[in-house]
Image: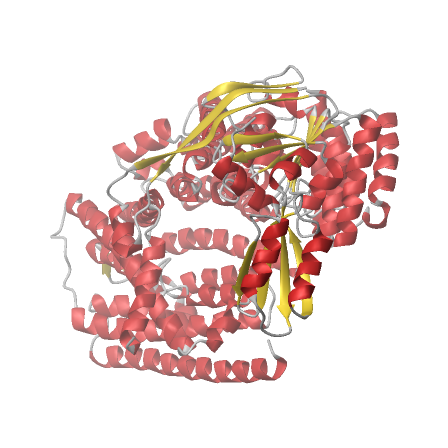
Amino acid sequence: MIEVRDLHKTFRTTKRYPGFAGAVKGLFTREYVEVKAVDGIEFSIPDGQIVGYLGANGAGKSTTIKMMTGILTPSSGSVLVDGIVPYEKRKENAAKIGVVFGQRTQLWWDLPLSETFSLLRDIYDVGEPDFRERMAFLESVLGLEEFMMSPVRTLSLGQRMRADLGAALIHRPRVLYLDEPTIGLDVVVKERVRAAIHDINRQFGTTIVLTTHDLADIEELCSRIIVIDAGRMVWDGSLDELRDRYGRRRELRLHPAGGGDDGALLARLRELDPEASLSREEEELVVAFDRKKAGLAAVVAAIMGNREVLDYSIRETRIEDIVKQIYAGAVAR
Amino acid sequence: MSLLRRYRLFTRNALSRLLTYRANVLLFIFGNILQTVVLFYLWRAVFRSSSSAALKGFSFPEMVVYLIASTATIQLTRSGADEVIADEIRDGAIAMNLVRPIDYRLRVLFDSFGTSLYNFAFVGLPAIAAIALLLGLWKGEPAMPVLHIPEFLLSLALAFALNFSYLFCFGLVAFVTTNMWGMSRLEMVVASLFSGSLIPLVFFPGWLRELSTFLPWASMGYTPVMALLGKLQGASLIGALGIEAAWALFFIWLSGWAWDRLVRRLAVNGG
Amino acid sequence: MGRYRRLYVRYMAQHLKGLMSYRVDFWFGLLSFLLNQGLGILFIGLVFSSIPSLQGWSFFEVLFIYGFAQIPRGLDHIFFDNLWILAWRIVAKGDFDRYLLRPVSPLFQLIAERFQPDGFGELLTGLVAVGVALVGLHLSLSPPALLLGLLAILGGVFIYGGVKLAFASIAFWTKFSQSWLFAAYRVADFAMYPITIYGKGLRFVLTFVLPFAFTAYFPAAALLGKEGLLFGTGSAIIAGAACSAAGYLVWRLGLRAYEGAGN
């Protein structure tokens, strides 16, 4: 479905000089800076797969997505989406894709939501019976009836996101690009959106490319994850594999009742995991260990045996931490 | 940081902000010059079509100076203080500014200085240069009429004070109405007519001419320019300056009063 | 093609529906635009109180040209206003991408999406001024003349549109290009008066560089009998076509640059 081969993109921007004197200088001279946003990315996404596309901000995610959706031309390399080169046949490609931006809407701001769908029907040339059938499906899956008649600018973020999702699907696209679709939403709505995405993928077989910072999105939806950092691919595999390889570090934060023998505790922990660590952060004691090597129960027992604990919290490795680790140590598959 | 330095920083920042895009600046200047150039050609045609060398007491060179000085005066005095305020009201930044240990009015005043300077440097000066060039090309009488600078500067200072406090009040109206855009445009139209920037007020029919000299807008634009050209002398000069000062004092008082009322109301309602 | 027509009708229907619910602000804006134009007419009137004619042009003739100039300007303002927004905000805020993600011409979407009734101020003033001038001149236009006049106005609309498109497209390179548009429109201001009062250089610019002279002077002078009718109106149509073509070219170049550089 989607073939990306040796993709590169370099940007050239003007250098900005700081301060007031700089602003005046900027009136008279010019210097350029080159930035390599995408540096040799390659992957294939088969039909119907849901792929999580991860990376820190500025890593090159949006640049890649822009090239895949056809709104940016690569410096070199190629992209094929369902046999079409998106930046060459933009309109043809556009008819087959749906895009949802978390931060920006594709809906018409001042009009009632129903009008957006009417306009989209004509833009995408959707036949009347198909339109009605899909509207019914989307309305039920996304719960759109309640605000179908409201102007888009009056919708809450959650409602708008669901509406954007519906708008991106009304023409039955082959590929759906979701850019941070659950950002800013509360937990209930997030669940609903995820369930909707899952349903749609099952019902229509839509290939989905999802960029997100939310680990739960990944866990619930993605069978495959691609991680990108500084324009390069540093991981391409499933979430389990990723977790297994890099997400093994667990952090336990404790509020101890008083002092205690840190040395003895550390020694005990090191029996469980030779690379366990113990540190103090203000009032808290932070224990970090490899969960494959030391079970949580054993670690907790070790701690309880050492001192009294008032409160604690467990933190799993975050995606960003994994990404950092990956880039620091590992090699892309 | 000393008080003066702090305020100077604001002026500099206003200028710095405006200098960021160079092509925009140049084109904006160019566009503004063009506006005056249209009028220049129009008046040239008018004077050529007239049998006498002077129209309503203006010779052609005087008319050209009038045009330039009118534009320059507007640039120097109309600082957009009302926009600054209205914008800040709209996005709530005004609350933040009330908390800062700087007198709000003074801050806006120095901001206005920055804008005025920018306007003058990039709009006024080039306009003057361009028109002077054009005037030099006009065959006929020696170009420059006598300019009365001291009277002009005095009147200009009063006009700035008047304009600033007037716009300040106008900006505060944004607290009452939700949209300023329509009102603001209306005000601009009225102001451009009665400040003489469209056409010298002497061209108005009798009763309107009399009335307009007493309106605040005449003091903002017309009086300084007429003073510059020496059309106001002795008694008439003192009279005109007096009206200017009166309006300035009125609006300064009004702006202070409105501001205090407003701050008190905000303190009560919590913004 | 039929799809575009259907789409445009749908967009317009939306705009007209919205027109019904306009608030006080709209009326204020309209009033101020009307007044602004009115000032121009007032200026002409006041000036003519001191002189018999303006370098050979009578008051009503000047009024006719001035009014005629407002009509294509107003129509351009009503239908092509989104191009201003492109120059000012759309590219800068990154809102342009969504036009590219749809299987319909982005230019079409951009233009169809906005309907700016403020332009009625200019349109109305123009029509009234032209009407009054025709009465004052005791001139009635024959049907063919009227038709040619309307065609010339159409040409004028596309002169404005083409120039606007060209300069607005600069935003694809520079993010903001409203100053370019501003400058171009200040040049258009010259076209509101008979161009015979300008120097040779200026007349050249208004005829061959930014052909705003064809939005008012040539067709109006033709209708007043001072220039050939066919020339006066035909030239406006040609100029309109030329400007549109040039504008579209700049647009396409800009689009290509935008797709190369992103935002």
Residue A91: give x, y in percent of width and height. 63, 22
The picture places residue A196, in percent across and down from the top left corner, at 80, 39
C208 on left or right of A260? left
Quadrant in which the N terminus of chain C is drawn: top right
Let me know if residue B39 appears in the view.
yes
Quarter of image, res B268: bottom right
| Nearest to the observer: residue B133 or residue C7 | C7
- The residue most toward the top is A83
Residue nearest the viewer, comparing B115 with B141: B115
Number of numbered discs visible in the structure rendering: 0
Q: Nearer the viewer, residue A254 or A212?
A: A254
What residue is rendered at 62% in x and 16% in y? A84
Q: Is residue C22 visible?
A: no
Residue C28 % position (x, y): 59, 59
x and y percentages locating residue A102 in the rendered image: 65, 44
Residue furthest to the left: B142
Q: Is residue C14 above or below residue B15?
A: above
Nearer to the camera, A271 or B223: A271
Q: Quadrant of residue A42?
A: top right
Q: How is the image coloured?
A: secondary structure
Q: Decide if residue A174 is on the left or right side of residue C200.
A: right
Write the residue at 19% across / 50% down: B132
